[in-house]
Image: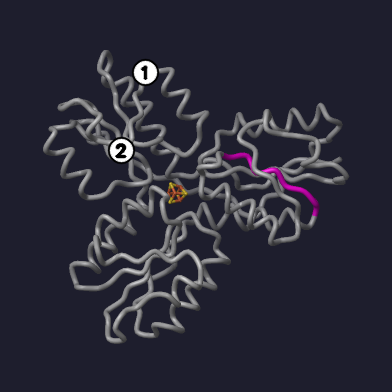
């Protein structure tokens, strides 16, 4: 059984930036408790490693003592959270991904202009919940075409379309077409808000189909983009399973396979992928290297001023 690695896969520029900022904050504020609102990324291994270094992860800003050093995650934050953080005099370091921030800025701008926002995304996902805070009462989540059918909006409503960054590109394309058919007056994003990393990882999985019949996606169940990679692999005709770590692998996942492809979500550390490959090698697999579809060079910088809190 041959083993191939999809490339690019793993950490994106937004996740790398967020982790670097938290890492630096730990060094910059020795002896202080550092609070992180929400998981820094949707990966338990990463969360556990920072928990072991003393970072306290919380879901509500109310759990954080007034005046504390507080890191906000790459998924962005609702404006109500930022207001409450100011009231509590929290010393905020916001690691929101610049691509997520772009969607928030668009939501606020359209709402200020009186638009209703249609948002292609997953209800309940952090990114969805928090961007909704910029258009409370005027925000409509669309996950399937039936959601478009069930919208009851006057025909002359000013509408703007936004999308979650980590969705399946193919699914989003067909939903955008459905929305435009129903609401031809809708203002579309300048370009789809799905990020470069999501697009690149999905294209890399599709390219695996030339060599492999089975795919293991390394990523957490809570990771939207990891789940979508499973869907993309299956849509391309491959058997696919999501594994959090090598411990989740069972022989049934690759039984009868002549070649297996490995990929990982944008929040998955490389070490977890290496461990998965090692386990498959022990089971008789031969690692043949990476199949690269694009050389990803994006990086998101930040100013040292971010720590002046
Ligand atoms: S997946 Fe894309 S939008 Fe999300 S953190 Fe990474 S670069 Fe940013």
Spatial distance from mark 2 to mark 1, Cα to Cα? 16 Å
Q: Position of residue 273 (x, y in %)?
A: 65, 34
Q: Is residue 95 left or right of residue 88?
A: right
Stretch of the chain drawn in magenta: 211-219
Q: Residue at x 24, y 64 (%)?
A: 137
Q: Is residue 300 left or right of residue 67?
A: right
Q: Is residue 31 above or below residue 300?
A: above
Q: Nearer the viewer, residue 151 or 78?
A: 151
- Whether the residue carrying mark 2 lies under 8 Å from ligand 1 is answered with no
Q: Is residue 279 above or below residue 10?
A: above
Report the residue marked by disc 2. Answer: 72
Q: Nearer the viewer, residue 241 or 273?
A: 241
Q: Tell me, yes or no, whether the highlighted magenta stretch contains residue 212.
A: yes
Q: Quadrant of residue 250?
A: top right
Question: For residue 54, which numbered disc appears in the image?
Answer: 1
**Going from the N terminus, do you reach mark 2 or mark 1 first?**
1
Q: Is residue 173 left or right of residue 217?
A: left
Q: Is residue 169 above or below residue 277?
A: below
Q: Residue at x 28, y 40 (%)?
A: 94
Q: Position of residue 186 (x, y in %)?
A: 35, 79
Quadrant into which the N terminus falls? top right
Q: Residues within 10 Å of mark 2 (few under 14, many from 20)?
A: many
Q: Residues within 10 Å of mark 1 (few under 14, many from 20)?
A: some
Q: Position of residue 197 (x, y in %)?
A: 51, 52
Q: Quadrant of residue 307?
A: top left
Quadrant into which the C terminus falls? top left
Q: What SS does tag 2 mark?
A: strand
């Amino acid at each position: 059984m041959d083993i191939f690695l999809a490339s690019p896969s793993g950490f994106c520029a937004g996740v790398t930036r967020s982790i670097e900022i938290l890492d630096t904050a730990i060094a910059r504020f020795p002896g202080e408790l550092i609070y992180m609102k929400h998981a820094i990324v949707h990966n338990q291994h990463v969360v556990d490693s920072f928990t072991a270094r003393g970072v306290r992860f919380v879901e509500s800003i109310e759990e954080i003592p007034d005046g504390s050093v507080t890191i906000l995650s790459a998924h962005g934050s609702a404006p109500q959270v930022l207001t409450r953080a100011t009231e509590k005099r929290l010393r905020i370091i916001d690691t929101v991904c610049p691509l997520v921030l772009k969607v928030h800025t668009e939501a606020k701008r359209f709402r200020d202009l009186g638009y209703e926002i249609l948002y292609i995304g997953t209800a309940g996902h952090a990114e969805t919940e928090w961007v909704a805070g910029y258009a409370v009462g005027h925000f409509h989540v669309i996950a399937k075409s039936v959601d478009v059918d069930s919208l009851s909006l006057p025909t002359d409503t000013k509408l703007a379309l936004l999308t979650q960054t980590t969705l399946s590109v193919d699914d989003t394309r067909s939903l955008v077409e459905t929305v435009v058919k129903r609401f031809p007056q809708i203002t579309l994003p300048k370009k789809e808000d799905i990020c470069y990393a999501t697009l690149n990882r999905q294209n890399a999985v599709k390219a695996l189909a030339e060599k492999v019949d089975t795919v293991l996606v390394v990523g957490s169940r809570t990771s939207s983009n990891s789940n979508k990679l499973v869907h993309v692999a299956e849509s391309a005709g491959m058997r696919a399973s999501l594994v959090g770590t090598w411990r989740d692998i069972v022989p049934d996942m690759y039984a009868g396979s002549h070649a297996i492809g490995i990929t990982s979500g944008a929040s998955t550390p490389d070490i977890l992928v290496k461990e998965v490959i090692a386990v498959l090698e022990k089971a008789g697999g031969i690692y043949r290297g990476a199949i690269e579809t694009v050389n990803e060079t994006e990086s998101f910088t930040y100013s040292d001023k971010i720590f002046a809190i």
